Every structure is written in structure tokens, then in C-alpha cells.
Image (cartoon, helix red, strand yellow):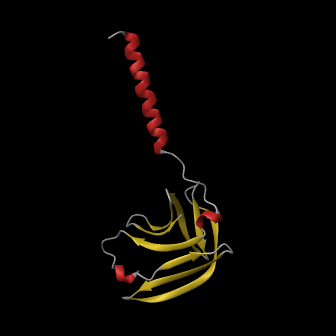
Amino acid sequence: MPLIMKLRIRLILLTLACCALAGCHAKQSPVTREAVVGSYTYVSKDPASTPTDHNLDHLVLRADGTYDLVEGGTTKAVSERKGTWQIEPGAPSGTVDVVLDHAGYPVEIKGQEVRLLIDLDTGIWWVKTK
């Protein structure tokens, strides 16, 4: 194979590799108050979690900056908290948290879902479908 053909193939492969790597690091949609306002349901992918402990959990973030958080289930006592929420810069830099009074939840936007992360290691978060 001629040298020029080898160089072209390498250049094409290098270009494809760069495009693939750039796609892996695409930024998520900007987080705005309008994007996070709404009703959220509790999601747990943790196999040790009992579904009836959280089947009544829900979170509502209102546009006026107030929230209503209900936690509990048919096998766990139900509690309700109301207060104020806001958006703040998170850690690491470049992330955004929704803060309910003093508890912060990192925001993740995936496709048509807005997630407020509770524990990503065990797969627990609040989710709102856009």
C-alpha cells in the first residue's frame, strides 16, 4: 500500500478517535430554576432497599422557591418537611446543587429526566420527567 494511503487512513482513524472522545465529554444542559421546578419521585436501584419504605416519597419544588418533601412508606413512618430551596454552585466546580434549606442534591440532566442525586454509588435519586 502506498505511503500516502497509509497516512490518509491514519488521519481518518485519528479524526474518528477525537470525535468519539469529544462525544464522551459532552456537557449537560444548563441547570436553571425553570428546569428543576416540578414534582419528583424517589428512585432506588439499591437491592437492599425495601420498596415499601419509600413508596410514599415525593418532592415538589415550586417556582416561588418553596418545597414540600414527604418521606416514608407503608412500612416506614411518614414525615413531611416544607421550606425554601435554591440553586447553588456545587463541588466539584462546574456542577450545580439544588439546596433544600441546608441539604444539597447535585443536579444531573439525562435526556428527558432531571435527577437530584442522593447516593449515586447505591443508585438513589429523585427524578422528574420533563
Q: Is residue 60 above or below residue 93?
A: below
Would you say 2 lies left or right of 65 here? left
Q: Is residue 68 above or below residue 11?
A: below
- Which residue appears at 49% of the width and 45% of the height? 25
Q: Residue furthest bottom?
A: 77
User: Residue 70 in the image: x percent, y percent?
Assistant: 51, 83
Q: Residue furthest right?
A: 64
Quadrant of the frame with the C terminus: bottom right
Q: Is residue 69 above or below residue 33?
A: below
User: Residue 32 in the image: x percent, y percent?
Assistant: 64, 61
Front residue (pair 79, 35): 35
Q: Is residue 26 above or below residue 64?
A: above
User: Residue 63 in the image: x percent, y percent?
Assistant: 66, 72
Would you say 69 lies left or right of 66 here? left
Would you say 118 lies left or right of 38 here? left
- Which residue appears at 49% of the width and 39% of the height? 22
Quadrant of the frame with the N terminus: top left
Total numbered labels placed on residues in the image: 0
Front residue (pair 48, 8): 8
User: Residue 109 in the image: x percent, y percent?
Assistant: 52, 59
- Which residue appears at 42% of the width and 64% of the height? 120
